[in-house]
Image (tube, rainbow, N blue to C red):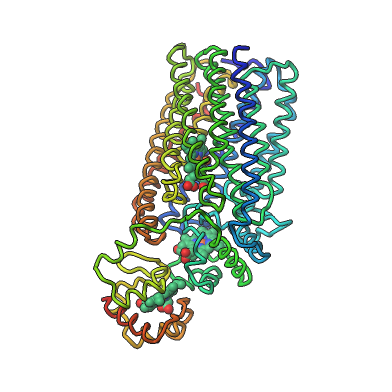
Amino acid sequence: MNSNKGIRNLFIYGGLFFFAVMAVLTYDTMQQLPHRAPEITDEVNAGKMVWHKYDCIGCHTILGNGSYFAPDLTKTAQRKPHEYLKNFLINPKIANPKATMPRLGITEEEAGKLVAFLDWISKVDTNGWPPKPILAAPAMVSTGELSAGQKIYQSLNCSECHTLNGIGGTMGPDLTHVGSRRDRVWLKGHFKDPQKYVPDSVMPLVIASDADIEQLTDYMLTLK
Amino acid sequence: MTIKYNSQKIAQNFYTFAVLLFLLQAVVGIIAAIQFIWPDFFILNFNTIRTIHINAMVVWLLAGMMGAAYYVVPEESETELWSEPLAKIQFYLTVVATLSVLLGYVWMGLDPQANKTVFGAGLLNEGREYIEAPRWADILIVASLLLFLLNCFMTVLKTRKWTGIQGTLLGGLVMLTVLYIPGMFYTRSMVADQYWWWWVLHLWVEGAWEVVAGALIAFMLMKLVGAERGVVEKWMYAEVCLVLFTGILGTGHHYYWIGTPPYWLWIGGVFSSLEPVPLLIMVWDALRTTRENRNIENRAGMYYITGHVIFTFVGAGIWGLIHTLPAVNKWTHGTQITTAHAHLAFYGAYVLLILSIIYTTLPAIRGIKVYNDSRAFKSFWLMTISMIFIALTITGAGIVQTIMERLMGLDYIAVKSGYNMWFWIFRAIFGAGFLIGTVVFVKDYFSLGKEQ
Ligand code: HEM
Ligand SMILES: [Fe+2]
């Protein structure tokens, strides 16, 4: 049994050595964290507490860790309008009739804090994660040159909420055949004031010049 | 087969508790699988179901380890346990703490507002995966672990037989207890929160628990095939040594994208890639030992331990290695690939470990000479084959998700409830297969040695 003394000591002291290295790296990491993210205000912290209170991590991932049942929320605040997110959190089904996220009883105040928290996390330096989808561009322009309306559609990030030919978000309705459902007047009016056309709509109003809205509408009408 | 010291019997209390929680884990696992297909399927939302699924697992694996230690320590020390009443108290403390936490989760599931924030932490649920247990329960858990360690150490001190096996076992258990503490304080930064959270989770499963497993494997090889102590202890040290040398800094594979400095890409990549090495040594050690010593009395125990070492290597080693390098992990991080690995690794490395120790020690505890092991084999194959297919279907879903969402930029929900639907359906079917295997095992556990 004594013949194992050498390797036993290697186990004990080697293990302690690696823990010591880990401790030093941890110290250094903790020193660097504040420089890799915006300041944590009291509101952001309050949002984090609300996050824990409702066990959001039991469905979502954040920074890529958590449960894998619902979308990752690391960059959500950069991609979706904050007003929309607040409405969604308070009552997902009103914001998005197809939503399966349950109504958890989040108050308006709590929703505001959560959005502040999500906004903070979206600005953390994550070494480039999540990466830009490298195959996305080829998939979108497979039909060739983009029309003016298509470019506006892309630059206004409409695809965050709408699907076209299978690509895009599912918050709003699929727009693949919207041109056969809606006419020019409806579309233009809806862009300028969604709630007037669809009560309780959470679609953000489109902020763009009249000319751009005209071209966007032309584009919508080609989708039949 | 009989036990040498009467107090070793206390192990059975812990095993029974573990086995019942295992059944609960499998049942709620099915509910979770159905919710992937049909989100409103149950009165409790997915988050509550998943919390119960993973917490039941952590607690039953820990209960299994405690039971095992109460069996091993008296035997290695060649004396009765220091205090049997203390062990009983510690057992009931564990049961009461677990059940109250469980009730709290259900309550919160029915009424999310019940999870009030008290002293900066949730009263019923801390909202951090795997360690959701609220602060008051953390304290009870640590108290229970400390009473348990006290009992073990006082037993060792009675005879001062510091064998390699029990030294390593207790070392691993102390490490496990200490590493629970980084998960017990609040941080304002979500980045720091996840940083410390991985100290608990990663350093448990790829550190402390592996050390415990190394010691238990050595003990079982001696029991099952009469292997020579000097030799198994040497290999045990080699394994646990490499586990710590690769696994501690291997924590870096969780620090690539959470807001921590970029040097972790190198440290995590290099050290975690080496983590499968000790797992391979474990396989080699177990297979060599069992081939050299062929006088096997307990075939079921032997079967499970062989399955254990092989599936540790497959689930943790191979399924871990495929996504551990930063260049791959950048695309797979946060996808179902992780889930596939988590299932196969926990099953291989820890579920089968605890089932091996149960099959190795239970016949002695119950004083049985021979028993019908056909049910043990049946449950082994039902569970193992089901788990392989569960892991394969989730891996398939993970590949589709990585390509469509991460590479092509499709929406998460479009991929999950469209393209991946068939994977969820098959996963639920294999999940049912697993549950049947679990039921066969539970039945076998309760009837072993009690028939005829
Ligand atoms: C020894 C048993 C092991 C168990 C029980 C285990 C378990 C887990 C679990 C549960 C997770 C997911 C945590 C979450 O919910 O976010 C995970 C993540 C991970 N594991 Fe393991 N693991 C083991 C060994 C290994 C090994 C040996 C490697 C590397 C070779 C490895 C590589 C990884 C990686 C890279 C991730 C992170 C995936 C991501 O978030 O991108 N694991 N593991
Ligand atoms: Fe890990």
Instruction: Tell me if residue B365 can be seen.
Output: yes
Instruction: Tell me if residue A101 can be seen.
Output: no
Q: Residue at the location (59% across, 32% down)?
A: B64
A149 sits left or right of B123 in the view: left
B6 sits left or right of B198 in the view: right
Q: Residue at the location (42% across, 24% down)?
A: B374
Q: Quadrant of the N terminus of chain B?
A: top right
A80 sits left or right of B188 in the view: left
Residue situated in front as seen by the camera: A145 or A149: A145
Residue situated in front as seen by the camera: B107 or B52: B52
Q: Residue at the location (37% across, 45% down)?
A: B393
Q: Point out residue B146 in the picture as x, y percentages from the top left corner.
A: 72, 34
Q: Point out residue B390 in the picture as x, y percentages from the top left corner.
A: 40, 42
> Where, by quadrant of the figure, is residue A164 drawn?
bottom left
User: In the rendered picture of this protein, how many numbered marks are placed on residues?
Assistant: 0
As displayed, is residue B207 above or below residue A48? above
Q: Point out residue B44 in the picture as x, y percentages from the top left corner.
A: 53, 56
